[in-house]
């Protein structure tokens, strides 16, 4: 499995504005924010994309959502958008599973 940018952020080999960490995951601000608040929640386990997750990852996946919600609250967000890009055709560019959390502006539906 190739080492991605996000593994290097976990290992503190490259800097990031980390706003939450526990034994299973990390949250840090996106370097190219698409909203006034935009952070990423990633598992420490290097799962390339959501569709690579397996049954034993069930609790971890739930944990990522709870952390996303908890950190959004910490950031003062009542309303926010979660986004997971799965695969290059869905605009995934970093192949280490991540949940985008965006807030601080209105979002339309359906997304583009
Ligand atoms: P994707 O397109 O794979 O769903 O999202 C990858 C996200 O990672 C993008 O929003 C991009 O701005 C962010 N990103 C890429 N490289 C870095 C980096 O080195 N540091 C941080 N904090 N975010 C990054």
Image: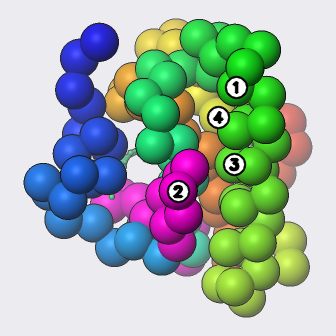
Which span of residues is magenta-colored?
20-36
Determine whether 52 is above or below 50 in the image: above
Residue nearest the viewer, comparing 21 with 105: 21
Q: If you read the primary sequence from the N terminus, does the residue marked by circle 3 or circle 2 appear first?
A: 2
Q: If you read the primary sequence from the N terminus, does the residue marked by circle 2 or circle 4 appear first?
A: 2
Determine whether 97 is above or below 29 in the image: above
Label 2's element?
A: loop
Q: Which residue is mark 1?
A: 57
Residue 92, image x, y percentages: 47, 25
Q: Residue at 31% across / 52% down in the picture?
A: 10
Residue 98, image x, y percentages: 54, 40
Image quarter for residue 36? Answer: bottom right
Residue 66, image x, y percentages: 80, 58
Q: CA distance from mark 2 to mark 1?
A: 14 Å
The numbered disc on residue 64 is 3
Residue 34 appears in the figure: no
Q: Disc 3, disc 4: CB below 8 Å?
A: no
Based on the picture, tell me whether residue 32 belongs to the magenta stretch: yes
Q: Which residue is mark 2?
A: 23
Q: If you read the primary sequence from the N terminus, does the residue marked by circle 3 or circle 4 appear first?
A: 3
Q: Nearer the viewer, mark 1 or mark 4?
A: 1
Q: Which residue is mark 4?
A: 84
Label 4's element?
A: loop
Q: Quadrant of the C terminus?
A: top right
């Amino acid at each position: 499995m190739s080492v991605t940018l996000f593994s290097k952020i976990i290992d503190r080999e490259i800097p990031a504005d980390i706003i939450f960490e526990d034994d299973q995951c990390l949250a840090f601000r996106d370097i190219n924010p698409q909203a006034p608040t935009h952070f990423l929640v990633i598992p420490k386990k290097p799962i390339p994309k959501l569709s690579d997750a397996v049954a034993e990852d069930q609790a971890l996946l739930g944990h990522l959502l709870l952390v996303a919600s908890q950190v959004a609250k910490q950031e003062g967000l009542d309303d926010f958008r979660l986004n997971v890009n799965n695969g290059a055709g869905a605009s995934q560019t970093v192949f280490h599973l991540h949940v985008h959390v965006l807030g601080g502006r209105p979002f339309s539906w359906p997304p583009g």
